[in-house]
Structure formats: C-alpha cells, structure tokens
Image (tube, rainbow, N blue to C red):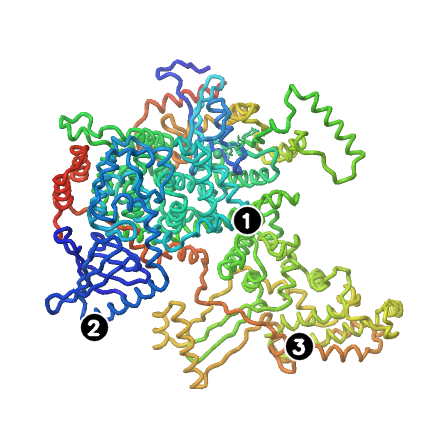
Amino acid sequence: MEINAVLSLGVQGEEDSYAGKLYILPPYLTFSSVDRKSVRFTIPLSTIRRVERLNARAGIYALSLGLWHGMKIIVQLTSLRPTADVFCSLLRDSLKVELQRGQMKAVKTFVKTCYSEALVPTESSVGDNEREDGSLISEEKDGSPPRESTYHGGLGLKFKFPGDPKKLREASKIKLWTTYLRAHGRNLTLLRYPQCTRLVQVGLPNRLRGEMWETLSGSLYLRFANPGVYQRTLDENKGRTTTSTEDIEKDLHRSLPEYAGYQDEEGIAALRRVLQAYSFKNPELGYCQAMNILAAAILIYMSEEQAFWLLGVLCDRLLPGYYSQSMHGTLLDQRVFESLVQRCLPIIHDHFQEVDVQLSVASLPWFLSLFINSMPMVFAFRIVDCFFCMGPKVLFQVGLAILKINGEKLLEIQDDGGFLHLMRDYFASLGDSAHPQSSDPRARAITRFQELLLVSFREFAVITDETILSERRRFRSEIIHSIESFSKRSAVRNLKSLERFSKEQAGMIYDALYKAMFMVPNTVIATPPTPSLLAANGEPDERPETRIELRTFQYFLSEIATWARDEKVVSNGFQQRIDRSIAEHEFIDRLFFFWDTSCKGALSFQDLVSGLDGVMFNDLMENIEWFFNLHDKNKDGFLSKDEVLTLSETFLFIFRYEIGDAYLGAVSRFMTNAFEYGDALLPDHEKSEEKPDGESTKPQAGSNTPYLNLATFRMVVLADEVLESFFETDLSASFRLESVPDMDLPPSSSGLLGDIWSNIATADNKKIFHKFTDEIGKTIGKHQVIHRPSIGRYTKLDEPKAHESLLTPSMRKSPSKSSLTTTSSTLSIPATPPMLSVDSSKKLPMRPSEYSPLPMVKAANAALMERSHFAIDDATGDDDTDDESERGADDDQVMDEVDAFLEAHDSGLTAADKEVANDLLHAKPVK
Amino acid sequence: MADPASGSGDKSVQVKLVLLGEAAVGKSSVVLRFVSNEFQANKEPTIGAAFLTQKCRLEDRVLRYEIWDTAGQERFHSLAPMYYRNAQAAVVVYDVTKASSLEKAKSWVKELQRQANPNIVIALAGNKVDLVLPSPSTSGANSLSESEDEADDATATPGETPGADSQPESLRQVPREEAQAYAAEANLLFFETSAKTGEGVVEIFTEIAKKIPIEHILASTRGGAGRPGAAGARPGQRQEGVNLEENQAKSKDACNC
Ligand SMILES: Nc1nc2c(ncn2[C@@H]2O[C@H](COP(=O)(O)OP(=O)(O)O)[C@@H](O)[C@H]2O)c(=O)[nH]1
Ligand SMILES: [Mg+2]
C-alpha cells in the first residue's frame, strides 16, 4: 500500500523535510521523495522499534517511527484521513507479523555483521576516534582492542586494500561517513539523503565499501532474509563438478592476479567458493567469464557471504542477461551504447562508421567487468561505487564521457587496433593531471579521473534510467532476432547431416523446435551430462547439446504434423477461429522413441531432422515399411497381434477427425484382412507347440508372438484404396514444415464486433472475447464447433472400394472368427465418426495467448523486463546527478569540492569542520 | 626488386588475424609464444578477446599482425563475429589430445568460410603436440615401451588398455593424418604445434604471411592499414595521397617478384 507523506528527521535542523510516497511492502517500509531521487529508504519493518502517533495540531496526522539504530523519523501522512487510518492499521498488522516471525530478534544478530556498527557505536556518544589514523591494516594491529570483531570484511583486511590510504584520504572519509551514518541510520536502516550520493561520488572508504555496496545495491536485504543459505548451498553441492565448476577452475588464477590476495590460496579458495555457490544457485546461468573479475573485486571488500548475494544482484538484476548463455543483455547494452554514442557524439560515431571500427571491441569489457578489467583498480572501484549508488546508467555515462574526453584523438584512429591502444593509454593516465599546463594550481590538481567523473555526471546527466530502459526496449527485438538467426544458422551448419532437407527447411524444423522449447520447457533443466561424466563413460567429450523431452516433442510435432494437433473451427456468428491444442497419443510417444536412436530419452535437433527425413521423402512402399517398423517394437520383422491392434489404433488416431465413413471403413477392413491373412499365413502347428501351457492346438498365435510380416502387411494395405493413398502421399504430406497458419481467421462480420476485435488484440483479451462471443453465439444458436480434419481427402460419404483384384482367392481362407471377435471387444470401433474412439487423449492446453512467431523474443523480453517492483529495487539506486550544475555552479569545481575540503582538512576533523562539511553538503537549494 | 629505403622506413602491411577454438586448447599460449617467445600460465583475463600485435618479416616485406585472441567459452560464441569480421587470416586451434576439440574447430572453419571475409586465409593448428610426440632425449625409451605394449596387447585380454600416462602416443586422440586430410579437403593450412616447446608456432604465421594476398590488401586500402571490406564499401574521403601512392608503388614491385 502507498500513501502520500512528508518525511523529516527526528532531530531538528538535521535535514530538510521531503514530500514523497511511503509504501508498505511487507516486510519492508519504503519511502521515495517526489522526484524519486533525492531521498529514499528501504527499511525492514523489523527494524522499527517504536511507532507513536504524534499529538500535533489538528488536521495533521503524523507518526514518529523509532528505528533500531536509535534515530527517529517523522512521517506526516498527507493523504485523506481514512487512507491514513488504513495505512496505520496495515502498518500495525505488518509489524505484528514480523514480531511473530522472530525477525525483530534477527536484526540484533544481523547488524553485528556490519562494519558500520563498529564505526558508530550504538551507545551513542562514545568517541569514534580509534580509526582516525586511517590505518588499513587489520583490526588487531590497532592500538585499542576491537570492540566488535564480528563484522564481515573482505580480503583487504588481511592483504591490504588497493591504493595509498593517505592519497585516498581514508581517515577523513571515514569521519564524514561516521557522521552521516550516525544521523541517518546505517546498514538495514540507512536513509539515503542527497549527501549520501555525494559522499559516494568522492569514493567510499575502503573499510566501509563492502557494506555500502551491499546496502546501496540491496543485496544486504537478501543476506538478511536468507541467513545460512550461502553455506548451505556450498554444503549441499560439496564435491560436485559441473561444466561451470570446470570453467571456474580455469579462471581462478587469472582474476586480478596482481592483487596480493589472489597470489594466495586463501583468496583463490574464497573466489572459488563464491563463484561455485552462485553457479549452483543459478545453474541455468552457471558461470560466465568476467564474473570472475567481479567476484574477485568485491571479495576484496566483503566476506564470501556478502559477495555471494551481491554477485546475485549483479548478475540477476543490475546487469540483466549480461552473463546468460546467449549473453543477450550484453549484446543489447552494446547496441544501446552505440545508439547513445550516435545520439550524443555524432561526429565520433560517424568517424567510427567511416573507418569501420566497432565500438564494442573496446566497450564490451567496460560493461562486462564494470571497468575493473580496463582501468587501474582504485579508479574502477570508484565507478563501481557510483554504479551501485546510481544504477546501471552510470556505465553508459562513463563510457560516453571517455569517448568525449578523447574525442579529438578518436577522430584520428583508423582501425580497431588504434582505438584499443588509445584507450589503453588513456586508462593508464587516469591518475595524471587533467590540466597540467594550467596556471591555477587548483585546476592542475584535478586528475583525469576526476575530470572523467565530472564529464560523466554533468554532461551526460541527460542519460537517465528511463533513457536506458527505453533504448533497451527499442533494440530488444532486433538483438533477439539476430541472436536467434545466428544460433539457427550455426545449429543448421553444425548438423552432422542435413539429410534431404534444404537449409531453409532445416531452419524451419529449428524454428518449430525452439518454439516448442519455449512453450513447453523441459522439466529438468541443465541435465546434460557433464563432460567429465561422459568422458568417464568412455564417450567422446561432447558439448552440451539441446535435447527435448517427450512433452516438448509433443508440442514440436503438433507444429509439424497435422494429426498431432486438435484443431477446432469455432464459429459463433461473430467470428470464426481455430482453437488448437496438442494431441496426445501413444503413437506420438512411439515416434519419439523411434527417433531416439541413441537412446538418450531425449531428442536432439539432429534426431528430429533425421527422423523427419525418414518419413517426409518416402514413396508408397517406403512409407508402408516405415509405418510397419514403427509398430514392430522388438524389430523382429513381425507384428504381433497386439501390435496389429496398436497399429489399427494409430490409424484411428490419425483419422480421428476425417469426415465421413471412408477412413473408418478402411480401418475396419484393414483389421479384418490383417487377421484373416495373418491367420492364414501362420506357420501352422509349430507355433502352438511352442506354447508351454499348450492350452490350444488350434493355429492361433498368442497376442505377443510374431504374427504379421511386412509382405503381408503391405498386401493388406494395398488392398485398400484409402490406405493406399494414405501411404502413397497423405502420410508424408501430413508433415508440413511451413509454420502453422494463424490461429484466428478474420472475423466474419466487420461490423461493431469486428472493430472491437481490432482494438483488443492482446491475447488475454482475445480469450475473453472468444468466450463472450461464444456465449452470445450459443444463445442465438449460431455456435458451432467443427473438428478440422488432418488429412481431408475423402470428405464424401461414399465408401471407396477395396481393391478386390489384389486379393487372391486362394488366400481367402475361412476367417478365424474367434480372433476377430476378441479383437472387436478390445477395440471399440466407433459407430459414428469422428473422434469417439481414440479420444483417450488428454489435451494439453495450448496457451494461445503466448502464441508468437518469435518465441525467443518473448522469453527474452520476460527475462529483460522482469524487474518487478520490489523493495530492493528501491534501494538499488537510480539517480542523483545533482541539479546544482544546472543552476550555474562552477562546473569544474562542484564535484571536487568535497575532495578539496577533504584535502584541506586531512588530519583530524573538529566539530567546526563538521559544520563546514555540513554547510557544504547543504549548499544546494532544496525544494 | 623493391627498394626498401623509401623515406619512412619499412612500411608494414597490417594483417588482422583472429584465433578461434575451444576453450583451453592453447590459443593464448600459441599467441604468447609467437609474440614474446615464452610459455607460461596465462595471467591475462580475457573478456571477449585479447588484442596483441607482432611483426613478421617475410623476405623483403614486413607484416604487422594484429592478433585477436578470442575467449574460448562457448557463450562468447555470439560475440566472435565482431572479432573475425574483416580478418584476413584465422588460426583455428584444436588440441591433439582431445578429439572433441577438432569437431569444434571444424565448426569454426565452417562458420568462417560462410560468414567471414571471403579471402580469409585459414590455418588449422593441432596444439599440445609435445604431449604426444616423444621428446628427443626419451625417444629410445619410448619406442621401447611402445614395442612392449604391442607385445602386451597381443597377450592381453581384449579391452584392457595399457596405462595412459606412461605412453605419450596414447594420449593422442586426433591422428595427424585425419586432421591433415580434413585440412586439405577444406583448403586450410595445417600444422601441428606446441606452444610449450615452440614447435610449429612461428611457421603458422610465416606460412599465413606467404599465402595472404598482400597485393589485394594494398590495392584495396588507403594508408597503411589493411581493411579490405571497409574501404571497398566507402569511397575515400580522406586525403592520404602520399601514403597511398607509396603503397601502390610497393605493391607493383611485389607483383614483379
Ligand atoms: N603441454 C602443453 N600444454 C599447453 C600447450 N598450450 C597450452 N597449454 C596449456 O593448456 C592450458 C590452456 O591454455 P590457454 O592458452 O589458456 O588456452 P586457450 O583457452 O585456448 O587460450 C594451459 O594450462 C596451458 O598451459 C602446449 O602446447 N603444450
Ligand atoms: Mg585464452
């Protein structure tokens, strides 16, 4: 629930008041100021320790919330009174639930894992002097004994943090942050006011960095909500090897190898565990190169458990699709970046076009590794600070700024190599002065890195989250389409055999396969046997291959074979449409196993191509043989009686919607003849002697013994015109590679409902519309459902003649009545067509709503747009890009002011300094 | 013959070369051997592709290789076209001790022949041959143990395999002849190499250099950089007349020899 509210801090004068919206999203309470960026918080309800209704002037409805960390926030509910009442009672109830869940107690243990607790003692006014020396060596070496050494920390505590602490002005930063955190809460209760962002922009202090990354990205909440999950994930998968774990192993020693922690087994082991744990948690993504760089980087600043959750937020939310199997997110954002360059830096873009240089050769690693692999770590980590605080748009802003700053030189490059060299040199010089020739010492002091941030956040402030989202939307289908056609081309190219299909035809089979995989995903994901497993079995180390299970195959076949789907033509007076569903029948299962030549229980693309080849190019005789083999389960060259029955059932299944009696008659004649000839050709008495019980001496085969051979079967089939034509052409033709035509026939009336139709073209609406019109149709007696025939050759009711001539009289022995009667009792031949007989088929609903020619587009869309509104999102930060600059502040210096301030007051901050800092931070006009 | 001392010193021809192949077959090691003649654990994290350059002297001319060493992980496959586009040469690497790596190599070759620059020169390199060839010092012992094997095999029960690690030759999963036959059929240069010992590595690059249609590159470019596809598509707006003539003069000379 949301409500309008005005937020102020309990301490007078500490912060201005902000109007915004307050949300209860159990188990969180979140606030966002009207501009959606100045002030925000997301706090677990369990950190709220006291709620008071303030006794204020009439007409004002205000609550005072006392939080775990001792600060008070006051929210004035400005919506209408009844809304406020509802809100309050919802808040009360939600708090109760949290209390009952024991979350209130969990807070106490959890916050102890946060460094900020050691930084800001809860016992209030105890001095925060002990870490002022900025020493970066681990706690134990400090003079004073650590008060709480239970907080989580990264490898940096032991192996030192990159960079010179003096130069980084660690002590002063810590001091400023201590002040901020004391007044605005910390870890779970952090309130994000504008100066939070500004402090982040001048670089987080090393010791606090890990925790702030967690808090700003929101991964802190996941760690809080899932205690012990990291360790459990590792324990449950102990000793498991997968493709991912093998890939991880290869990269462990090339992940920030220059950092001391990774020249040590301790660091390597931590990195291994975090990457493995993520790959176990998300096996579909597994492990992608570049994740090693991210994990190695964050592990310098945070514990394994913290890193595990942060890596999750990175891969799943902040960099969506970057590391997936298709890397669609990476390709998409590269495309978006290119389009932003075209828009913001057209001259550079044109030059790149002219000399045919692709931006991505340089920018790909920027995005995939958050610049960590491109810049010196100290600088990259400051960009990462901003990324967690302000969101993914930071990558684009920095990328654009890099190009802009190097604009002139870029216009001289002629090829990819030149581009890369230029970038390499630039990154190596980031620590140099941006204006070495300037006479103003202040200007000289500005480094190229500071310049980069200035340009990023000032000049490219126009790049907002909305820009990125809308650009992503713009290019999504283009990217997905190109990935699809790329993988289609390589799948077709890599077929061991195209058989008799053309490439285009194989491509159509591929399309049907992928559509099926999207509509009916395999139940067990990621089961391809690992290479090591295969190797152990002595099989060649095969690359994991896409294979589909039976259920998916049913869908696949329904795309290709007319009889593998049930199609109902529904007309109701307003429209005519085809409702389609997947048929299920033993025959389809049989086909599945028939095509599974390597007995893997799943079919590969090649299996499907070869399988279809086995039937689609057949002539009459080949088709008869194919059909025979399909039903000869033990491949002994004979059908047993049971198999003859099954085969007849297959006929009935395929013919189930044919109009008229022709096909039924044919099947019935087939059975009569099959048993007649079968019995006639029985090798007489030897057969019966084989039977141990010897129950009968009559020449009668057991239901499972060899009975009908191919020659006889062929003869019986050819004796019938309908069956003959079925095998001659109809069977092969019932497999069609062109995509199944549209589900919806155009509405029969173009009147009012026709117009409505064109306006409601969303799938869900269509369903409702269909239902609606069906109902009307029924009322006015126009509702009619016809099953569409699969073959549709003999539509008249005339009965085709058997080919009498083919039946040599000598073979017409007396039909063994007995066997026929048993038959007809097991198999009920329907008296009226269609569909009575075989319809044991359960129907899979086909979800017409998701019917799309580009199923992957949908899948990917879903993946990309899946960012549901969750409290964590609010914490992951979208924006700051301060407005000061637009108000005429001296561009070159605003960003640097805090830096300069820190410079001037590097040693020891007094209370007066704090005021100065505060003034500085407040220098901005507030609404 | 060409006059090498024409003003700016040796003007080199730039050749873009891409390395492709399954992960861990030794692409980066081969490049490292070629570029700095050393063999060591690969310390450079590769995201997408690593970029290196190396000059290669060939008779009277110098080629400057721009080498793109691509990441081997399967999912980076869709990024590969970015690196092989406009490439004049490709080295497709497989590992002689791993049969599946040849299959992957074949699929790269197919892809290059369909999608890349039509004049691309492709070399197939079967790497890690040090693992399967008896090194000179131990060759005697090796052949001895091999003959012992044969004797063993004759008496041993079928299906029992001799210990794999003691006989290098048994590590081999791709027979030289098989790969060579495939290379001939697909019109590829073929080498067996070892980044570890250096065997065959430089040869790949010199043989490629010989086969590269340098005249074609020079003719289709302005300036020093060889970028055939691009230059053809866009008529030159740049003024680099001097360089251009210089290059063309050179290319004429080259035709004469
Ligand atoms: N024995 C041997 N090992 C090699 C050779 N080339 C590479 N390696 C090893 O194979 C592994 C993978 O090599 P790398 O160059 O990273 O392969 P890439 O993934 O194709 O770039 C490393 O452990 C190398 O040391 C070789 O010629 N002989
Ligand atoms: Mg490599």
Real-space CA distance between mark 2 and mark 3, rounded to the nearest whole angstrom: 71 Å
Label at residue A638: none
- Relative placement, left or right, of A595 versus B64 is right
Asked if one can make out residue B49 in the rendered structure from this viewpoint, the answer is no
Residue A116 rendering spot, x and y as whole percentages: 28, 45
Q: Is residue A441 above or below residue A535?
A: above
Query: In the current view of this chain or complex, which residue is farthest to the bottom?
Result: A780
**Residue named by callout 3:** A664
The CB of the residue at mark 2 lies under 8 Å from ligand 2: no
Element type at mark 2: helix
- Amino acid type at circle 2 is Pro
Query: In the current view of this chain or complex, which residue is farthest to the left?
Result: A57
Residue B83 rendering spot, x and y as whole percentages: 44, 37
- Relative placement, left or right, of A583 versus A717 is left
Q: Pointer 3 and pointer 1: residues touching (CB < 8 Å)?
A: no
**Residue named by callout 2:** A82
Real-space CA distance between mark 1 and mark 2, rounded to the nearest whole angstrom: 64 Å
**Residue named by callout 1:** A492
- Amino acid type at circle 3 is Leu
Q: Chain of mark 2?
A: A
Mark 3 burial class by Cα count in 10 Å: few <14, some 14-19, many 20+: many
Q: Residue at x 36, y 56 (%)?
A: A865
- Relative placement, left or right, of A91 versus B2 is left
- Relative placement, left or right, of A577 versus A160 is right
